[in-house]
Amino acid sequence: MSTNSELKARLARLGPVRDADPPPSFSGDAVPLVLRLEGALERPIHVLQRLRAAGLTLRSAHAVINRLAETRLAVCQIADGANIPVLATDLAAMNVHTFRRRQLDPSMIAEVRARHGLSQREFAEVLGLDIDTLQNWEQGRNKPDAAALNLVMAYDKSPALIEQAVFEAVV
């Protein structure tokens, strides 16, 4: 038997390796964060340590560091109880900027539509929605999912972009 096979067999008998320094546990829901590297990743170990202190496992924090180094962007799940504003401040000092999903209120859909001067039917057509769905959202009978709210917010920020993406010129 080769040395490699012997080592694997011995390790298998020992069982799984436990994390010697488990991350702190937090109660509450996980919050998706987008981390964007602005500049050089000069202190990756400090970033990793800060992510660990915010509840990420060593493996997850390491994966975030690798993604930041490769693509300058990483997405991770941080426990809501981990004091995200403090985490964002600490990471910003290391050239890593933190973004969280906007807290969108479904009641703002009618405001966005009115701000752009569209009827319910026109707004539903532009967004590719059924008119009944839009009416149910605006009247509070149903709640849109996050993707639908993101589409409404994108339209509010850049109607021309959404129109270009959804419609094509007729020649």
Image (cartoon, rainbow, N blue to C red):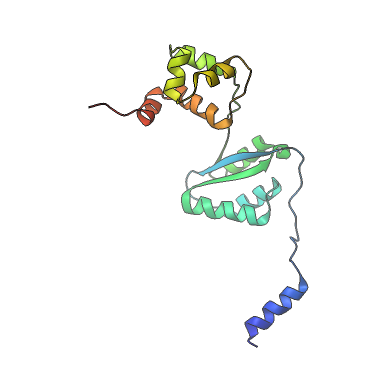
Is residue 54 shown above or below 63?
above
- 155 vs 170, left or right, is right
Q: Nearer the viewer, residue 152 or 69?
A: 152
Q: How many marks?
A: 0
**Which residue is at a point 75% across and 57% down the rendered structure image?**
21
Question: As rendered, which of 86 and 79 lies closer to the eye?
Answer: 79
Q: Residue at x 53, y 28 (%)?
A: 148
Indicate the position of residue 43 as horizontal and vertical percent values: 57, 53
Please identify the quadrant where the N terminus is shown. Answer: bottom right
Q: Is residue 117 above or below residue 148?
A: above
Instruction: Answer left or right for 22 relative to 129.
Output: right
Of residue 19 and residue 111, the one placed in the foreground of this image is: 111
Q: Quadrant of the C terminus?
A: top left
Residue at the image position 40 percent from the left and 27 percent from the top: 162
Q: Residue furthest left?
A: 171
Q: In the shown orientation, is residue 146 left or right of residue 57?
A: left
